[in-house]
Image: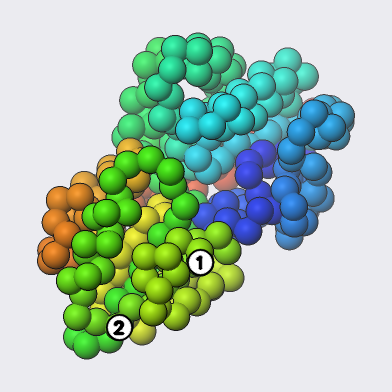
């Protein structure tokens, strides 16, 4: 069996690399994996160029050589032109060349413009197997295609995380990312001014370090290499302030009382689902642990998605042998 994994991999983003490693873990060792990759080669498979028009010949060749294509992570987002066209055109190409396009643990949107929604709709109508990671994505998929997807969760739930006892006077962990819109900088600055604890930055991508240093100039910064290392480092903190989706998940799962910086819909929905506040709602106090129903529910959704994924992989392998 040969699988093409399509996403923004190999660019030093903790979330995307977590997804890559989780999917690799779910596939049999005998499976050949081709990965669209950015500046860095991705472990676990053969990397092909991701960016630019020159990436298309290798992508077309990969479609001809592989049995199916998996699209995962945050896809079809019109925060940028490439965020929609990269995925939509590749889904359409995969379908046309009979390399079955599938969505596993993907998040869709936002899609604010009419043009982006039309292009995304054309692409998604070619997808027959879709397991999405949140309510907003599921509703958007149904709206654009008329079909109901499987309701899964994020691939990071593949990795076990141990909940740690709370540490009353330990530092606060701060994860921030570069983002050009919204009032989040003012809100975070207000929150950090009211903190009585030492601040420690925890980056999920190297570019996070700059914005953490901008808003918390006295903070030391650590940069864990994997999701498991990120979650394990949370044992050293008493509170967490998180902006990136996977940083928030790691803090929530480790048992930290947290508050989220909801720069987009997926982080807002995560805060609501976990029963925690956003910094827009309270810029002084209000740090909370994730509710137990959220943790249990996400584990259940991952188990369902995992079973469906393994069944799908067996079918791909069986069809290949015919």
Q: In which quarter of the image is residue 186?
A: bottom left
Instruction: For mark 1, give the secondary structure.
Output: helix
Q: Which residue is drawn at 14% across and 65% down?
A: 284
Instruction: From the viewer's side, name the closer residue of 88 and 21.
Output: 88
Placement of 87 over or under 106, stated as above or below:
above
Give the residue pinned by disc 2: 198
State left or right for residue 69 relative to residue 71. right
Give the residue pinned by disc 1: 209
Using the numbered discs, state the Cα–Cα distance from disc 2 to disc 1 in whole angstroms.
17 Å
State left or right for residue 127 relative to residue 52. left
Placement of 43 over or under 127, stated as above or below:
below
Q: Residues within 10 Å of mark 1 (few under 14, many from 20)?
A: many
Which quadrant: the N terminus? top right
Q: Residue at x 27, y 86 (%)?
A: 170
- Residue 15 at least partly seen: yes
Q: Quadrant of residue 151?
A: top left
Placement of 68 over or under 284, stated as above or below:
above
Q: Whole-percent x and y of residue 70?
A: 63, 37
Q: Which residue is drawn at 40% across and 52% down?
A: 245
Q: In which quarter of the image is residue 96?
A: top right
Which quadrant: the C terminus? top right
Instruction: From the viewer's side, name the closer residue of 186 and 308.
Output: 186
- Residue 3 at least partly seen: no
Instruction: From the viewer's side, name the closer residue of 229 and 302.
Output: 229
* Dot 2 or dot 1, earlier in sequence: 2
**How is the rendered protein coloured?**
rainbow
Q: Residue 163 carries which label?
A: none
Q: Whole-percent x and y of residue 275?
A: 18, 54
């Amino acid at each position: 069996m040969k699988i093409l994994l399509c996403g923004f991999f190999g660019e030093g983003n903790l979330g995307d690399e977590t997804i890559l490693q989780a999917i690799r873990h779910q596939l049999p060792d005998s499976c050949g994996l081709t990965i669209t990759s950015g500046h860095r080669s991705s472990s676990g498979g053969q990397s092909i160029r991701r960016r630019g028009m020159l990436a298309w010949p290798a992508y077309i060749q990969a479609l001809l050589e592989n049995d199916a294509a998996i699209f995962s992570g945050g896809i079809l987002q019109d925060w940028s032109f490439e965020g929609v066209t990269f995925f939509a055109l590749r889904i359409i190409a995969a379908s046309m060349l009979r390399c079955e396009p599938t969505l596993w643990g993907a998040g869709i949107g936002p899609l604010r413009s009419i043009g982006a929604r039309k292009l995304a709709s054309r692409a998604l109508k070619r997808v027959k197997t879709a397991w999405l990671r949140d309510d907003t994505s599921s509703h958007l998929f149904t709206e654009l295609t008329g079909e109901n997807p499987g309701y899964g969760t994020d691939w990071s739930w593949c990795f076990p995380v141990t909940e740690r006892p709370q540490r009353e006077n330990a530092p606060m962990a701060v994860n921030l990312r570069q983002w050009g819109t919204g009032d989040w900088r003012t809100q975070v600055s207000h929150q950090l001014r009211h903190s009585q604890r030492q601040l420690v930055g925890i980056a999920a991508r190297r570019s996070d370090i700059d914005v953490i240093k901008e808003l918390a100039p006295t903070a030391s910064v650590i940069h864990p290499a994997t999701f498991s290392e990120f979650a394990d480092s949370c044992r050293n903190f008493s509170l967490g302030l998180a902006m990136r989706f996977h940083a928030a998940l790691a803090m929530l799962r480790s048992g930290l009382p947290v508050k989220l910086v909801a720069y987009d819909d997926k982080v807002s929905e995560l805060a609501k689902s976990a029963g925690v506040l956003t910094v827009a709602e309270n810029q002084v106090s209000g740090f909370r642990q994730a509710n137990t129903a959220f943790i249990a529910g996400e584990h259940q959704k991952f188990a369902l998605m995992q079973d469906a994924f393994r069944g799908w992989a067996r079918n791909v392998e069986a069809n290949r042998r015919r």
